[in-house]
Image: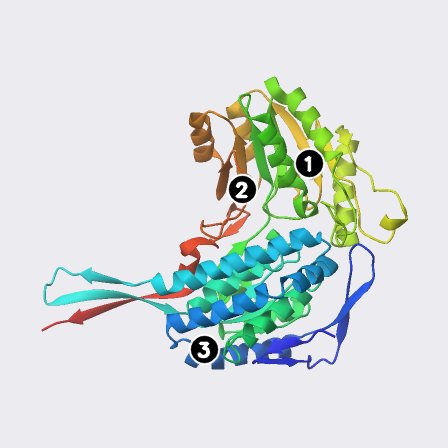
């Protein structure tokens, strides 16, 4: 049975209740997990608040050294962790290991960045005085992560928070707490003082609510659905907490008439169907210039039809959707599009066979001629279904791409750099990829516009969200 980690110890919930985590591919029980409540969240926050009093004054070099030891401890267990992540989330083992490697890369980036991050000296008009800008830790940080990339998205919060001298209470998604709990146990075992890094498992309605409303929590980092993000912003705002919200997306990909179609095909294939299409940062709308539409779509359909679907413990590219409810939602969105005139190019059904009966499987789907008022357009599609449209030129494509409440990412495939720059400047998105896969690099700032969020994770910019800026004026005479 998986326990929470609070104040440097594995503990049980004060509720004495547990819940089940089941494998999305088989329905089998993976483990029992502590069902935390508000009291558990409070004691984790109190432990983090107590630990902050000393942790904030440790040198950044000491903090970095502890993080490096933790990184190596996690790396030594990557095989075990990959299988565990596959079992609880559903993604193939290779993709699970890739996610953990991404987590380790991000943690390493911040451990290295910390000792090189500085304040500044400021000359002042009065020559008998000068100014300093200090960068100081904020206090207890709440890190709330979703189920689709539970480890990567934990790392984007925990890494900068810890190296900046803050303490953390992490709340994983209720359905994917196991790998995160094990990693936090390994990081604590590498030398983090008790209370610096904690994890509380349980429902968002209790554990999450306490984290975003408790006055001892000064910083909230949340990744999840846009409607939940609005509630996080509302409640956090009452306490004037600093927040970053990485929310939903409906990212467009534009394939121009001069595009390298092989590159475009690969970009669309991976960008939509990796992790069974369950990503906020994923290609969810495809706009193809009329001149290359038929050739490109034929190529993409052929490639998608070759995708191997199955249990992530086997050699497959696409596992099941994470929950039965998630599959039902995607199927409903596809059916709505078809009812409004969309053509099914491939998929729109479930794979057949005894090995699929107990899992949340669906075949990868491509649709054409999707109505603009269909759910495939007006809602975020969190699964392996992609609508495709013809466009006459770049302005037409950008107009359609921007006709969305979301603005997380966008992509364009073209050999013409003037087109690429034109699109990059006009696409309403926090991130734009040119002739490149949708990949969130730890070295680059990442976040959205419109309903896709507030603030930035990744990059040196993320560290600013975990530090208070203090101006100091000093008289020299």
On residue 386, the disc is: 1
On residue 161, the disc is: none
Residue 203: x and y, percent?
68, 67
C-alpha separation, residue under disc 1 versus residue under disc 2: 16 Å
For the residue labelled by badge 3, is the local secondary structure a helix, a strand or a loop? helix
For the residue labelled by badge 1, is the local secondary structure a helix, a strand or a loop? strand
10 Å neighbourhood of mark 3: few (<14), some, or many (≥20)? Answer: many
Vertical relation: 349 (above or below) 392: below
Q: Quadrant of residue 475?
A: bottom left
Residue located 52% across and 71% down the image: 168
Name the N-terminal-most of marks 3 and 2.
3
Name the N-terminal-most of marks 1 and 2.
1
Residue tagged 2: 409
10 Å neighbourhood of mark 1: few (<14), some, or many (≥20)? Answer: many
C-alpha separation, residue under disc 1 versus residue under disc 3: 46 Å
Residue 369: x and y, percent?
70, 26
Residue 74: x and y, percent?
58, 66
On residue 52, the disc is: 3
For the residue labelled by badge 2, is the local secondary structure a helix, a strand or a loop? strand
Residue 236: x and y, percent?
52, 64
């Amino acid at each position: 049975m998986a326990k929470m980690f609070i104040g440097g110890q594995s503990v049980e919930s004060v509720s004495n209740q547990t819940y089940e985590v089941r494998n999305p591919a088989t329905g089998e029980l993976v483990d029992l997990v502590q069902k935390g409540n508000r009291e558990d969240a409070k004691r984790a926050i109190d432990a983090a608040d107590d630990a902050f009093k000393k942790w904030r004054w440790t040198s950044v070099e000491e903090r970095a050294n502890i993080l490096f030891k933790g990184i190596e401890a996690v790396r030594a267990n990557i095989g075990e962790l990959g299988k565990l992540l596959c079992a609880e989330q559903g993604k193939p083992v290779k993709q699970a290991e890739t996610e953990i490697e991404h987590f380790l890369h991000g943690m390493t980036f911040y451990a290295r960045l910390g000792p090189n991050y500085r304040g500044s000296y400021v000359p002042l008009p009065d020559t008998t005085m000068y100014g300093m800008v200090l960068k100081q830790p904020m206090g207890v940080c709440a890190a709330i992560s979703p189920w689709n990339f539970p480890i990567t998205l934990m790392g984007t919060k925990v890494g900068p928070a810890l190296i900046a001298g803050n303490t953390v209470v992490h709340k994983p998604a209720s359905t994917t707490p196991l790998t995160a709990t094990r990693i936090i146990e390994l990081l604590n075992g590498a030398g983090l003082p008790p209370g610096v890094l904690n994890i509380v498992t349980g429902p968002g309605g209790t554990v999450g609510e306490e984290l975003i409303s408790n006055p001892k929590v000064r910083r909230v980092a949340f990744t999840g659905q846009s409607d939940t993000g609005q509630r996080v912003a509302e409640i956090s705002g009452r306490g004037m907490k600093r927040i970053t919200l990485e929310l939903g997306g409906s990212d467009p990909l534009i394939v121009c008439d001069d595009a390298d179609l092989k590159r475009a095909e690969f970009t669309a294939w991976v960008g939509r169907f990796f992790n069974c299409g369950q990503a906020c940062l994923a290609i969810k709308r495809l706009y193809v210039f009329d001149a290359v539409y038929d050739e490109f779509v034929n190529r993409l359909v052929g490639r998608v039809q070759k995708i191997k679907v199955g249990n992530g413990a086997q050699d497959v590219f696409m596992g099941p959707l994470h929950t039965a409810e998630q599959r039902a939602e995607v199927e409903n969105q596809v059916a709505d599009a078809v009812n409004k005139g969309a053509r099914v190019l491939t998929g729109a059904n479930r794979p057949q066979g005894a090995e699929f009966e107990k899992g949340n499987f669906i075949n990868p789907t491509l649709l054409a001629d999707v109505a603009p008022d269909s759910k495939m357009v007006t809602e975020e599609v969190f699964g392996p279904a992609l609508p495709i449209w013809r466009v006459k030129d770049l302005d037409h494509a950008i107009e359609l791409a921007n006709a969305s409440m979301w603005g997380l990412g966008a992509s364009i495939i073209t050999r013409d750099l003037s087109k690429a720059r034109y699109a990059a400047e006009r696409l309403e998105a926090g991130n734009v990829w040119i002739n490149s896969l949708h990949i969130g690099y730890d070295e680059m700032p990442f976040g959205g516009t419109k309903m896709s969020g507030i603030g930035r994770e990744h990059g040196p910019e993320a560290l600013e969200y975990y530090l208070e800026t203090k101006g100091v004026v000093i008289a020299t005479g």
